[in-house]
Image (cartoon, helix red, strand yellow):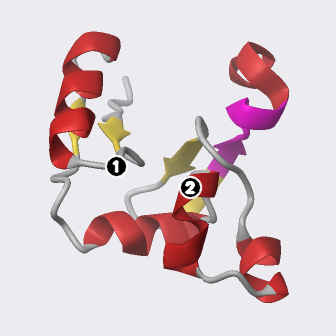
Amino acid sequence: TARKISIIFVSSDFSEEDATTFFKNAHGDWLMLDYKSALRSELKRKFGVWAGKEASQFGTSIASFKSRRSGIPALAIVGLDGELVNFLNAELEGFEALM
């Protein structure tokens, strides 16, 4: 049975306009989570991925930094149940993370 996947871009851009421009210019035929969606922050917090410039949004405590797995880019592979299946830290490992 062939498995289908969906790639969903979650922006860390400063503005909705920046996010939309980056998405249109740099991404394939993917989906993009609405910039104004509260789910953006929820997913970033849940999977520990956010840009350094977003640190104040997620807290500057030691515990906040320890909960951060990666900056951007990163790829969280999530199952249908919403649980993390695999995590690729492209910020740290570069392109090799995808191999």
Q: Amino acid at mark 2?
A: Lys
Q: Which residue is located at x 83 percent, y 28 percent?
A: 93
- Residue 47 numbered mark, or none: none
* Left or right: residue 14 compared with residue 90: left
Q: Secondary structure at mark 1?
A: loop
Q: Are marks 1 and 2 in contact (CB under 8 Å)?
A: yes
Residue drawn at the location 39% of the way across and 70% of the way down: 41
**Does residue 20 sit above or below 37 in this rendering?**
above
Quadrant location, the C terminus: top right
The residue wearing badge 1 is 14
Q: Position of residue 89 (x, y in %)?
A: 73, 39
Above or below: residue 87 compared with residue 24? below
Task: Point out residue 72 in the picture as x, y percentages from the top left corner.
Answer: 60, 40
Q: Is residue 87 magenta?
A: yes
Q: Is residue 99 visible?
A: no
- Residue that appears at 70% across and 81% down: 60
Does 82 lie within the magenta span? no
Residue extent of the magenta highlight? 86-92
Estimate the x, y position of residue 86 in percent, counting from the top left.
67, 47
Q: Is residue 20 above or below residue 21?
A: below
Left or right, 95 with respect to 58, comes to right
Mark 2 sits on what residue?
A: 53
Secondary structure under badge 2? helix
